[in-house]
Image (tube, rainbow, N blue to C red):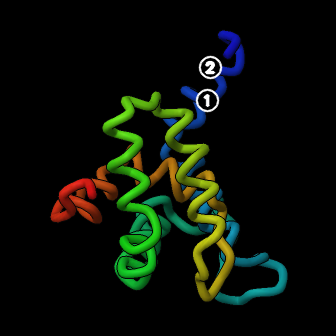
């Protein structure tokens, strides 16, 4: 991967507000959904709280769908940006009530400690 692409990936992963904002906006269009507010209006802390609520509500689906893949990727020592891409593909196949931004979800789960919380009791089968 060239350095420019690597830098863009690192910048995206470092921008927590962008990650959570991308997930939030995948839930609906603020022009048509009264429950979705534009990112400039809703505070980042509220978006993170909503992600936590979404995570808790989808924990079983996520756990069943991605923990084995995550453990395999850890064993294979896959680099973070590749791990995000691979888990995003798996997340895309899961059935959620509302479609989500798969790359943002994978990045948040991997970089914000959610995978450890989700899969810590797994033995990496």
Residue 67's spot in the image, x, y percent? 36, 61
Using the rendered view, name the quadrant where residue 119 is placed.
Answer: bottom left
Badge 1 crowding class, 10 Å Cα cut-off, few under 14, some 14 to 19, many 20 or more, is few
On screen, 93 above or below 102? below
Identify which residue is drawn at 21% across, 62% down: 122
Between 26 and 79, the residue placed more toward the observer is 79
On screen, 84 above or below 67? above
Element on which disc 2 rests: helix
On screen, 97 above or below 87? below
Specify whether 119 is left or right of 96: left
Residue of label 2 = 6
Between 23 and 75, the residue placed more toward the observer is 75
Using the rendered view, name the quadrant where residue 8 is placed.
Answer: top right
Identify which residue is drawn at 46% across, 33% down: 80
Specify whether 108 is left or right of 98: left
Residue 29's spot in the image, x, y percent? 78, 76
Residue of label 1 = 9
Element on which disc 1 rests: helix
Identify which residue is drawn at 62% across, 20% down: 6
On screen, 44 above or below 6? below
Between 24 and 120, the residue placed more toward the observer is 120
Badge 2 crowding class, 10 Å Cα cut-off, few under 14, some 14 to 19, many 20 or more, is few
């Amino acid at each position: 991967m060239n350095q420019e692409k690597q830098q863009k990936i690192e910048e995206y992963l470092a921008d927590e507000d962008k990650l959570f904002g991308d997930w939030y906006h995948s839930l609906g269009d603020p022009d048509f959904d009264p429950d979705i507010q534009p990112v400039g209006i809703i505070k980042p802390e509220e978006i993170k709280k909503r992600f936590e609520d979404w995570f808790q509500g989808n924990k079983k689906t996520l756990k069943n769908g991605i923990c084995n893949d995550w453990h395999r990727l850890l064993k294979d020592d896959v680099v973070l940006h590749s791990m995000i891409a691979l888990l995003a593909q798996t997340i895309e196949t899961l059935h959620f009530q509302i479609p989500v931004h798969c790359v943002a979800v994978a990045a948040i789960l991997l970089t914000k400690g959610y995978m450890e919380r989700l899969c810590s009791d797994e033995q990496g089968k």
